[in-house]
Amino acid sequence: MTDTPQTPDWLQSGYDRIWMPYTQMQTAPLPEAAVRTEGTRIHLSDGRELIDGVGSWWAACHGYNHPHIVEAIRDQASKLPHVMLAGLANEPAFTLAARLPEALGLPPYRAFFSESGSVSVEVALKIAAQYWHNKGETKRKKFLCFRGGYHGDTFATMSLCDPVDGFHAAFQGVVPGQLIADLPEDDTTEAALADLLDREAATLAAVIVEPLVQGAGGMLFHDGETLKRIRKLCDTHGLLLIFDEIFAGLGRLGGMLAGGLADVRPDILTLSKTLTGGTLPLSATLASEDVFQAFQSNRLEDCLMHGPTFTGNALACAAANASLDLFESEGRLAQVQALESAMLPTLEACRGMPGVQDVRGKGAIGVVQLDIGGFDELVWLRGRFVEEGVFIRPFTNIVYLTPAYNIAADDLARLTDAIIKIVPEWAAKFGKK
Ligand SMILES: *Cc1c(COP(=O)(O)O)cnc(C)c1O
């Protein structure tokens, strides 16, 4: 018999060479070595098993290794993993483009594929800017975004994130400044936005918003009325409206699109995260037929000036097609409703506990907002959750769940039980009242 090593060889040697995301590597504990996933379980190299509450940055919406997606990837890999999309067509990408609008409850929109959420937002910005350029309106170059928003980590998308809470304070001045406003959640903020647009609309290409929930900004929810107000103001000022549905779309809030739940349609929208069920990097930027028409002419320079190497990657698109299948074949949206009605009332047990500021959620998002005093408290909470056998990763001032839509009831209970148990431990340890 051979002993299973407690720590695999590659962990420390790799840690000494890899650059981890959003991690202070001098003080961070070594990450857990994940060696296998299955459903909502993450298996670690030392034999421990974690129940996953995060879905790997909100992406693994059918759980890990769903056989239908795995088979689609395997099948596609043996036939045609990738060919460039200029001059060559591949079946998964064309099928995905053709089926996406109907699956999302939209009229025909055009789909442009890239490989990350940030890039799909960049493409949305380029489409909006070039739309006006093609129409001969050359002064519309800026964008308006909202406080609390997050749209990615690349330079242009950083300029659209909340300047205070948006993770990117180090880059102020490096990125071009955009206009930022409060979400028009009531008459006062709506009037302020209307005033701002009266002054600035002629310089703006588009308004961008995360519809119904601002994720990385701290899981902040707003209602459909707010989106209706934004749509109305964009219409009166002749502005394009971009919905960044990268977090909120594809079932997370219980509908295929957050915009659909609010009955508001954007001119351009972005998808990523759950698009391949969290298996492969892929994103889509979808534009309305009206937007697309502005790029139709007999001049080459009017075409969309963008084309990442891996656009329309056949493997990723095959995974996305398989993921869309599952919404129908396994009744995913109904499962999100069931998840919501099991998760949110259970988390309510935290309301009123010392240090708990709020309990909120919608669809497959559950949030407990805490009076977090410092980064050491987040580190303690993260470690304590792993000890408890769950992968839950609080950030800023929230402990949250974004589990797979089809998580089993007992796994969900393990996640909510862990939160209900550990929040009071945190409060006692850090002296919360
Ligand atoms: C995650 C996220 C992005 C960025 O996507 P990446 O794939 O990480 O580049 C953009 N917008 C929203 C709303 C997101 O949640």
Image (tube, rainbow, N blue to C red):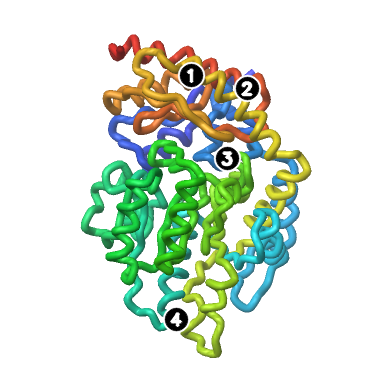
Identify the mark nearer the N-term, 1 or 4. 4
> What residue sits right under mark 3 in the picture?
253
Identify the mark nearer the N-term, 1 or 2. 2
Identify the mark nearer the N-term, 4 or 3. 4
- The secondary structure type at the circle numbered 1 is helix
Q: Is residue 138 above or below residue 280?
A: below
Verify CB contact (< 8 Å) between mark 1 and mark 3: no
Q: Quadrant of residue 61?
A: top right
Q: Could you tell me how far apart the alpha carbons at marks 3 and 2 are, in whole angstroms? A: 20 Å
Q: Is residue 13 visible?
A: no
Image quarter of the N terminus? top right
- The secondary structure type at the circle numbered 4 is loop
Q: On the rendered structure, is 181 left or right of 332?
A: left
Q: Position of residue 21 (x, y in %)?
A: 39, 43
Verify CB contact (< 8 Å) between mark 1 and mark 2: no
Q: Is residue 375 above or below residue 188?
A: above
Image quarter of the C terminus? top left
